[in-house]
Each structure stands twice: as structure tokens, then as C-alpha cells.
Image: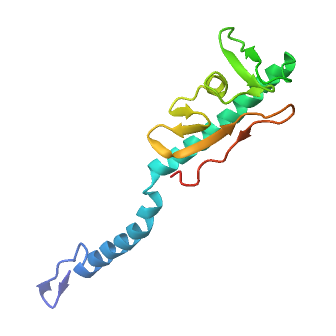
Amino acid sequence: MQLSGKSVAKQAGFTLIELIMVVVILGVLSAFALPRFGNFKGNAEQQATIAARSAVQSAVDLVHSQALIENKKAASNETITLEDGTTTIALAYGYPDNTSNGIQKAVNLSGFSYTSPTFSKTGNTSCTFDYASSTGVGLPPVIGAVNAACK
């Protein structure tokens, strides 16, 4: 393009002001977004502990169903053998008791340790929940809530 006999080149690129504004906007966005995504590990461990608690509840239900089928619900010192024919579960009134031969064998959680009455996430001692055996006929065991400090 020519104006009054001189050649004028067309400008390409961004001005310094535009580049500074982009950097400022990205900085503000990252200040709000990063804290929301920063605790992936803690959230994952909390969800794993919640899932483990659900697995314990499922194991309790399965063992109790088998105990009802075998009519083993009236005493606190009975056992059942699971379908594999080799795993024997200690019972307390038709539910897994809170020993290593009871609930720990029934659920067999990897990534968790069990020291009666507490299940703990390996490597995170704040991610726990408790298991209390049945105390009488018709009384199910109590599976505690996941520790509120689990993060």
C-alpha cells in the first residue's frame, strides 16, 4: 500500500500491552484453578477408603447370606466355608467376627491393613474406619464411617 508516495508495511503480531494482559489473565485463572486440582492424591485415598468400606459391607452381606443358608446364626463361635472350599470365616451370630479369621479373611483388601477393630489405608494412617462384630442374634455388625480427617 502506498500513501503519498511512501510504502507502508502492514503490522503483524501483538503489542506489548496485549501480551501483558494475556499473562495477567492466565495468572489470575491459574490462581483460582490450581488449588481446586492440587489435592488429587488425598482425594484418591479418601475415595479408596470409602470404596474399601463398601467392600467390607458387601463381604458382610455375602457371609451373612451363607450363614443363613447353613443356619449358623445363633452362636458367636461358628464358622462357614466359602465356595472355594478352603477359606473358613469365623462368625459372630451369623456375621464375620472382628478377627483376622473373620472380617479380614472375608474381605481380603489389598492396600489396607487390619488391626481389630480398624481398617487403615496403607501409607495414610488418617484414612481409617472401624468394624465392630455383631453382639447378638439379629444385630448386624457396625461398620463405622470413614475418618473425617482422611484426605
Going by the picture, which residue comes out furthest to the top?
85
Q: State the count of labels.
A: 0
Relative placement, left or right, of 69 versus 107 is: right
* Camera-side residue of 29 and 3: 29
141 shown above or below 84 = below
Q: Quadrant of the N terminus?
A: bottom left
Is 117 above or below relative to 100?
Answer: below
Q: 5 left or right of 150?
A: left
Q: In this rendered view, identify the residue nearer to me: 20 or 112.
A: 112
Q: Quadrant of residue 14?
A: bottom left
Residue at (81, 27) in percent of width and height? 93
Q: Quadrant of residue 76?
A: top right
Q: Name the image colouring.
A: rainbow
Task: In the rendered view, tell whether residue 5 sits above or below residue 39.
Answer: below
> Which x, y percent locates residue 19?
27, 75
Q: State left or right for residue 3 relative to residue 63.
A: left
At which x and y percent is residue 26? 36, 70
Please name the residue shown 45% across and 57% down the image. 37
**Residue 31 percent location from the top left of the image:** 39, 69
The picture places residue 21, in percent across and down from the top left corner, at 32, 78
Identify the residue at image location x=41%, y=62%: 34
- Choose top left, top right, bottom left or bottom right for residue 138: top right
Q: Given the current orientation, which residue lies at the most extreme left position?
A: 6
133 relative position to 37: left or right: right
